[in-house]
Amino acid sequence: MQYRIWLFIFTFFIIVSCEKAPETKAIITVNDINGNPVQGATVWLSQNGQISPQGTVSNISDQQITDSQGQTVHIFDLEKVLNIDAQKTQGNDFLSGSDVIKLVKNETVFKTVQIN
C-alpha cells in the first residue's frame, strides 16, 4: 500500500515539474497617426551596444514584419529592456517610430508604437 502511495506522489511530481513555463513574449502593434494598424512595417527589437556590469557588450536583436493587424510577436528567454524601432516606406514617404519595452520573464508584454 505504501509503495503505491509513494509511486503516486513520485509520478505527480514528475508530471508537475515537466510543465513548460510560459514564454517571455513581446507583442508589438504598429499604428499610423490615425490609430490604424500598419501592415508590412519592419519592427526591430534590440539591445545592441548595451554594456553589462561585467563589461560585455550585448548584441540581442529580433526583426520581424507586421501582419494584417499591424502586430509582431517576439519571444525571448529572459526578461530584458529593449529598444523598439518600427519603419515603413510608403511610396515616397518614410514612416518611423520608436519606443522602449521592458519584458518580464514568463509573461506577455504588449506595446503599441505609432509611426509617422
Image: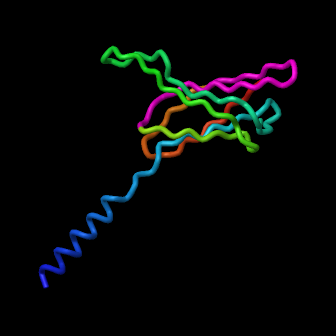
Residue at 51% across, 40% down: 75
Q: Which colouring convention does the figure follow?
A: rainbow
For residue 17, which quarter of the picture?
bottom left
Say whether residue 84 is magenta.
yes
Residue at 42% across, 41% down: 105
The magenta segment: 78-98
Q: Residue furthest right?
A: 91
Number of labels in the image equals: 0
Say whether residue 105 is magenta.
no
Horizontal arrangement in the rendering, residue 16 relative to residue 116 (left or right): left
Residue 96 against residue 113 in the figure, above or below: above
How far from the left and from the top, in percent, is residue 38? 77, 35
Horizontal arrangement in the rendering, residue 2 relative to residue 47 (left or right): left
Nearest the viewer among 17 and 79 is 17
Residue at 47% across, 47% down: 23
By secondary structure, the bulk of the magenta-drawn segment is best described as strand
For residue 90, which quarter of the picture?
top right
How far from the left and from the top, in percent, is residue 10? 21, 69
How far from the left and from the top, in percent, is residue 68? 76, 43
Horizontal arrangement in the rendering, residue 116 relative to residue 83 (left or right): right
- The quadrant in which the N terminus is found is bottom left
- The quadrant in which the C terminus is found is top right
How far from the left and from the top, in percent, is residue 28? 63, 37
Residue 55 against residue 29 in the figure, above or below: above
For residue 51, which quarter of the picture?
top left
Q: Residue furthest bottom?
A: 1
Nearest the viewer among 65 and 114 is 65
